Structure formats: C-alpha cells, structure tokens
Image (cartoon, rainbow, N blue to C red):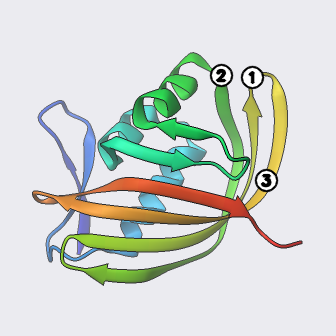
C-alpha cells in the first residue's frame, strides 16, 4: 500500500509500506508534473536524476527543477494514456507511461505524445526517480 507522508521539511514523500515499487508512485510523479508541483517533484526525484527528453535534451535534477521554478518550462494539459510496471525487484522499479502534454518551453508551445520509461530506486523507505527517458510515440 502506498501513502503520502510528510518529510521533516513538511513536503510529501512517496513511501511504500510493503517496500515494493507501486505504480501509484509513477502516477504521483505524473500528477506533480501536471500541477507544475516542484516541491513534490523534488521529493520524488533522486538528487542525481538524469532526464533525457524526447528532443534529446538532457537535464539533471537541478536544471530541470530550476526551469520549472523560473518559468522557463511550464506544463499545460498532461494526460497519461497508458501506464504499467515493467519491472519491480528489490531496490529497483521500472515504469512505462505514455503521456500526451502541452508545455511552454522558453516561450515556445510544445505539443508532445511520448513514451516515458522511469527508473525508480529505493533509498531507505522512499522510492525516488533516478532516470527518466522519453521518446516520441509513433503517429
């Protein structure tokens, strides 16, 4: 069972009472993106996150969250049309999602339909995203 707890800083953090990776954690990540919720993303992302975007751009945790905080990146509508756990074993969870979204990247409106593979790692009693890889979905 997954629940939302508050960390010492008062921010939500994803935990799993069973210790196993749960697709609800991935749904929480997608909801945070749709809400441009940097505080929740900061809790969900590993400090050394590597995010490879569908256009080939690569972000670290700091650069991605900074773009959201400064308004250089702002998500509009985000729709998840598919989601499943690909692998869950010990300290590793891998989720696949298909997202359709609109975003404003430095004043340019982007419409995207992408496949996303999220690699989650367990750090203590928390699951955090270590790698995000997105690629364009077929037309």
Label number found at residue 50:
none
Label number found at residue 72:
2
Q: Name the residue located 47 percent from the left edge and 30 percent from the top edge.
A: 65
The residue that label 1 is drawn on is 106
Quarter that holds the C terminus: bottom right
Which structural element holds mark 3? strand
Q: Are marks 2 and 3 in contact (CB under 8 Å)?
A: no
Which structural element holds mark 2? loop
Q: In terms of sequence position, does the residue under pointer 2 or pointer 3 come before the other?
A: 2
Q: CA distance from mark 2 to mark 1?
A: 5 Å
Local packing at callout 1 (Cα closer than 10 Å; few below 14, some 14-19, many 20+) is few
Q: CA distance from mark 3 to mark 1?
A: 16 Å
Q: Name the residue located 33 percent from the left edge and 41 percent from the top edge.
A: 48
Q: In terms of sequence position, does the residue under pointer 3 or pointer 1 come before the other?
A: 1
Q: Are marks 2 and 1 in contact (CB under 8 Å)?
A: yes
Q: CA distance from mark 2 to mark 3?
A: 17 Å
Local packing at callout 2 (Cα closer than 10 Å; few below 14, some 14-19, many 20+) is some
Q: Name the residue located 34 percent from the left edge and 48 percent from the top edge.
A: 44
Quarter that holds the N terminus: bottom left
Is 103 displayed left or right of 119 in the figure?
A: right
Q: Position of residue 129 (x, y in %)?
A: 36, 55
Q: In terms of sequence position, does the residue under pointer 2 or pointer 1 come before the other?
A: 2
Q: Position of residue 69 (x, y in %)?
A: 51, 22
Which structural element holds mark 1? loop
Local packing at callout 3 (Cα closer than 10 Å; few below 14, some 14-19, many 20+) is some
The residue that label 3 is drawn on is 112
Q: Position of residue 107 (x, y in %)?
A: 80, 22
* Above or below: residue 16 compared with residue 70: below
Q: Nearer the viewer, residue 41 or 138?
A: 138
Q: Name the residue located 51 percent from the left edge and 33 percent from the top edge.
A: 64
């Amino acid at each position: 069972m997954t629940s939302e707890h508050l960390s010492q800083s008062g921010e939500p953090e994803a935990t799993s009472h069973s210790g196993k990776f749960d697709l609800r954690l991935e749904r929480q990540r997608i909801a945070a993106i749709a809400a441009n919720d940097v505080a929740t993303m900061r809790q969900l992302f590993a400090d050394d996150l590597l995010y490879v975007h569908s256009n080939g751009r690569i972000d670290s945790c700091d650069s991605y969250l900074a773009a959201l905080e400064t308004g250089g990146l702002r998500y509009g509508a985000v729709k998840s049309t598919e989601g499943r756990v690909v692998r869950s074993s010990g300290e590793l969870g891998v989720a696949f999602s298909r997202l359709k979204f609109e975003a404003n990247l430095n004043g340019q409106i982007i419409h995207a339909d992408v496949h996303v593979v999220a690699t989650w790692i367990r750090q203590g009693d928390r699951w955090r995203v270590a790698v995000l890889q997105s690629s364009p979905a077929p037309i």
